[in-house]
Image (tube, grey):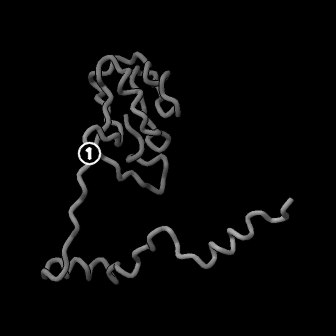
Amino acid sequence: MRLLPLFPELVRQLFREPATNRFPAKYLPPTVTGFLRDVAAGRAQLTPPVPTPPEFRGKISYARDSCIGCGLCTKICPSHAIELLPTKKIRIWVGQCIFCSQCTSICPKSSLSMSAEFLLADEDRYSENLIVE
């Protein structure tokens, strides 16, 4: 029985090049305002955003007016991100959502849909950006 079976692999990894790309910090501009000045002067160029593919599962959109309050979405949600309110409407906690789209499939009135919005990072998990009502 070997004492440290992974020790040879550890030594090899110490001297091997990393398998991932290095963070491109050396390519970042010194300041954002300086970069924007360079863009305005034509010395730099903004990279256009990448379009989202069809059937992309981004932030959930909720059509409150067409919702009948049946609660099927709350029962099928595996992460318990959907809450049925006493007003027979729902509240979606986007920070808890796993974007599986099961709620959109089961909704009888198609009140729920997946949007193309995906930049959802926030410092507060209870911010207005991360709650859909």
Name the residue at 57% across, 76% down. Answer: 16
Q: Quadrant of the C terminus?
A: top left
Q: Which residue is pictured at 29% across the width and 23% down the height?
A: 110
Relative to 36, say whether 132 is above or below: above
Residue picked out by circle 1: 53
Q: Secondary structure at mark 1?
A: loop
Number of marks in picture: 1
Residue 39 location, x and y as percent? 18, 77
Q: Residue at x 41, y 45 (%)?
A: 130
Please tell me which residue lies in front, 26 or 74: 26
Residue 99 pos. (x, y %)? 42, 38
The correct choice, above or below, for 18 with respect to 50 in the image is: below
Q: Is residue 53 shown left or right of residue 125?
A: left
Q: Residue at x 61, y 79 (%)?
A: 15
Residue 85, by quadrant, is top left
Amino acid type, label 1: Pro
